[in-house]
Amino acid sequence: MVGKSEASKHCIGELCGEITDFSRLPSYGAARPPGLSSIMGGCGIAGCMDLNGGKIRGDKIARMLSIMSERENGLGSGYVAYGLFPDHKDEYCLQFFFDNEESMFAVEECLKKRGEITRDECVYTTNHTDIPLPHPMVWRYFFVPKSSSNPKYKDPDQCIVDLVMNINFSIHGAFCISSGKDMAVFKGNGFSYQIADYYDLSRYKAQMWCSHSRFPTNTPGWWAGAHPISLLDWSVCHNGEITSYGVNRKFVEMNGYKCTLLTDSEVITYTWDILVRKHGLPLQVAAFAMAPMYYRDMELMNDHNRQLAQQLRITYKEAFLNGPFSILVGRSRPEITMLAMADRKKLRPLIIGHNEDDGMIYAASEECAIRIADNDAYTWVTNPGNPMIARVGEGIIRYGTERPFEGAFNEQ
Amino acid sequence: MMSMSSNMINSALAASETVIDATGKDQYGRPIDYKIVNNEIRRAVSEGVKNITLTGVMGQRYIATAVDKKINISINGTPGNNLGAFMDGPFIEVFGNAQDMTGNTMSSGEIIVHGNAWDVTGLSMRGGKIFVKGNTGTRVGIHMKEFGQMSPHIVIGGRAGDYLGEYMAGGVILVLGENIPKQISPVGLSIGSGIHGGRIFIRGKVNANQLGVGAKLETVNDDDLKLINELIKEYESWFGSSSSEGDFVKVVPFSSRPFRGHFDSTPI
């Protein structure tokens, strides 16, 4: 257990352990450098949601995800649950990985300066696991930010974003993995079945689950770097690569976000936050900004939509995610919502399932993930770059096969 | 690695027929590894079995990959990606939906899907036939090829998504658009993008602006109609009668070298 007597040795603003002198890294000649070089694969994503707001036990999503075992190599997997804390709906649930006690104290000090910790608890993890060491400690805080007259901290959401960015950037050995309301992320550096087992997901019941099994292509496998990548109540599970990472990174950094996860996928989370929370775009409009149609295809649209598409393309050219991807996006406010989409050329798989009888909606990389959960679901594939959007209480808002912007302005 | 349960194989009455039961799950609910299932198929094939039935299939990939004997395989469940990849001869019938990349680079044989077959169905096909009762996804029939007597055919009962027949170099794709309202096109955008051989037939509405680079519309001739009718007849022999309403649209390459001068003006 963590003692609480020692003061932190780490202060905010201090950079720890960064390698800046790359010539000090080991070099290799004819011998192949260590690492994964010849195992093929691709990430797997899976999500499920009860449109009527019923609760789904965590072992269901674990079954859905771990059936796609060809899509992972044990270097990261994670789950996010929405509708998890009905008794703490108005507080932010901050979940952290801590490597040591010092980092925990530093985070707690930092939190107390900015607000009130209403409750904190250890996130349950099992002792008997074959996930390779080390395992960081997982801790949960329910947090209410201080109301402030300082305009910089007036908006509680922005206060949380700044807090999370600062902690992840500057406190060595601590990482905030989720910071939303009524949701929590469970992730780690292992196979999907190992992570589900490690957190004993069957003890949780949630209205929506999204999940990801990782096959890191260009970046290291580590606990915090596993998906879902979450900020506020946004979570993103991403299969693919963001070729335009440099541009997208500059876009989010200009807007005050810090890229700390050593993976391209984090820019997607921050881009959603900018486009929807800060700029107020409807979800599907933000989706079409990230996966814009070709100018040639815009010519086929009516005048209003063509102008809209062209203006989006020009205004948000830095939010355009170029490269192959399919993503699952979750959020809990105003209502629990799932968005699933692929890139504008559909270079990564995505399939949607719906069972009208029990109101379940599924999204996954492969049909088998849906079939193992529900043999009777109706399945379809979305069009390239076209989002499927579903919301608890409202049902399916878009199937992902409609024309762009259809019904966009009926959205909240 | 999961081990094979003793009841997984029930050698049925005759040695020429085998049932492979893939329903088993490990303690985490994960299905039997595709390598085990495929080893059983290969063993049965090498023992001269002519009819193989697979039950409880749940996402196992590469089923019947590179099998080069004229055998029958029927699959109950959801076969995984790359069903029948590189196969040369087998007849495969799927009672369920197939995932992505069905019939990848197959040379001969047939795949009948009594459901949907999603993205990239029939990619790089060299010969043989794929019949899909329901819908397909994006990029169906990408880079199909024909040479001499070898010509691949894909018949889709429902709809096909964007990039149908992308970089197509030969063979035939037929989209029937069953149960799709007349005002809606049964195909997406960029049809035949980069096409330089082969033919795509679509029953239903297709606008010229749905065509990709290098593709053009052409009138269906008598030879085409003969082929279409043969394929529909075979489709109906598997799935029952189809509606016979609507005219066919034919998409063909504009030239055998659609990108000549596009990237490099140097003549070859």
Image (cartoon, rainbow, N blue to C red):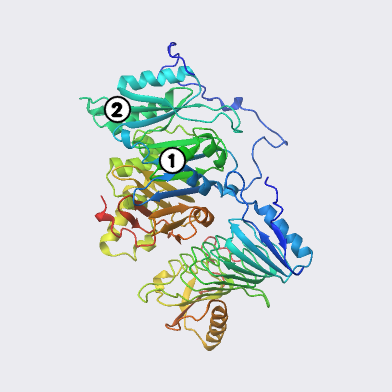
A132 left or right of A258 in image: right
Q: Position of residue A167 (x, y in %)?
A: 40, 25
Tell me what residue is drawn at x 62 percent, y 68 percent: B125
Check the image and report above or below for B253 versus A179: below
A151 left or right of B172 in image: left
Q: Amino acid at mark 1?
A: Val
The chain letter for the residue carrying disc 2 is A
**Marking on residue A80:** 1
Q: Residues within 10 Å of mark 2 (few under 14, many from 20)?
A: some
Along the line of sight, which residue is nearer the eye, A269 or B260? Answer: A269
Q: CA distance from mark 1 to mark 2?
A: 21 Å
Tell me what residue is drawn at x 26 percent, y 24 percent: A146
Secondary structure beneath dot 1 equals strand
Check the image and report above or below for A201 versus B79: above
Q: Position of residue A12 (x, y in %)?
A: 40, 19
Q: Amino acid at mark 2?
A: Val
Q: Which residue is mark 2?
A: A144
**Marking on residue A8:** none
Q: Position of residue B53 (x, y in %)?
A: 66, 65
